[in-house]
Amino acid sequence: MAELNPVAKQIDTISPAPVRLFLSDGSSGVFEIHNAEFFQAEFQGEGHRIDDETPYRFMTSDDGEEVIAGRRSDSSDEWTFVGEVLRVEAVDQNNTDDTHSTPDNGNEASTESTTEATDEITLDPENINEVNMED
């Protein structure tokens, strides 16, 4: 069986609790993800930003290397590509107000994809979920 995408695994593990996603377009937000599931190695989930009810879809790319995000248009049933999910963080459910922050462009790590192996992940102790990045 193919290896599961580590970003998708983090989203699946943390949800349905709020999750902060950092996207390749430079935006980040706190999302409520529902219907997150794997079909073999392919990931798919739906959700919305906590400050906006616009639907979002998240899925692995055809090669399984990226988790991509799309947003539904307010005026139609069309979906717009938003970008790749670069990083995932658990969110303290009592502190979800930072919904429009952007990564520090001076920090190279903020734009690095989490599909690469990392040695350490820091999370709020109240929201720690163990994820084996080697599975």
Image (tube, helix red, strand yellow):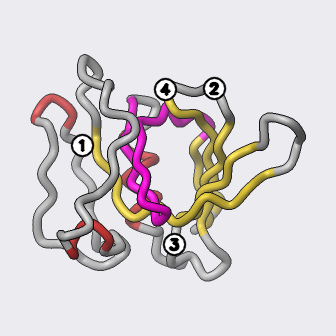
Q: Earlier in the sequence, mark 3 or mark 1?
A: 3
- Report the amino acid beneath label 1: Asn
Q: Earlier in the sequence, mark 1 or mark 4?
A: 4
Q: Earlier in the sequence, mark 4 or mark 3?
A: 4
- 16 is within the stretch colored magenta: no
The alpha-carbon separation of the residues under discs 4 and 2 comes to: 7 Å
- Report the amino acid beneath label 2: Glu
Residue topped by disc 2: 53
In the picture, residue 29 is in which quadrant?
A: top left
Check the image and report above or below for 100 versus 8: above
Q: Which residues are magenta?
A: 18-35
Judged by depth in the image, the label closer to the viewer, 3 or 2, is: 2
Judged by depth in the image, the label closer to the viewer, 4 or 3, is: 4
The alpha-carbon separation of the residues under discs 1 and 2 comes to: 27 Å
Image coordinates for residue 15, horizontal then vertical, percent: 43, 36
Judged by depth in the image, the label closer to the viewer, 1 or 4, is: 4
In the rendered structure, are the residues bearing label 1 and label 2 in contact, judged by CB atoms less than 8 Å apart?
no
Count residues near mark 2 (Cα–Cα under 10 Å), then give few for <14, some for 14-19, many for 20+: few
Residue drawn at point x = 57 percent, y = 27 percent: 52
Q: Earlier in the sequence, mark 1 or mark 2?
A: 2
Residue drawn at point x = 37 percent, y = 74 percent: 115
Q: Earlier in the sequence, mark 3 or mark 2?
A: 2
The answer to whether any part of residue 60 appears in the image is yes
Residue topped by disc 3: 66
Residue topped by disc 4: 50
Which mark, by number, is residue 129? Answer: 1
- Report the amino acid beneath label 4: Ile
Q: Is residue 135 left or right of residue 63?
A: left
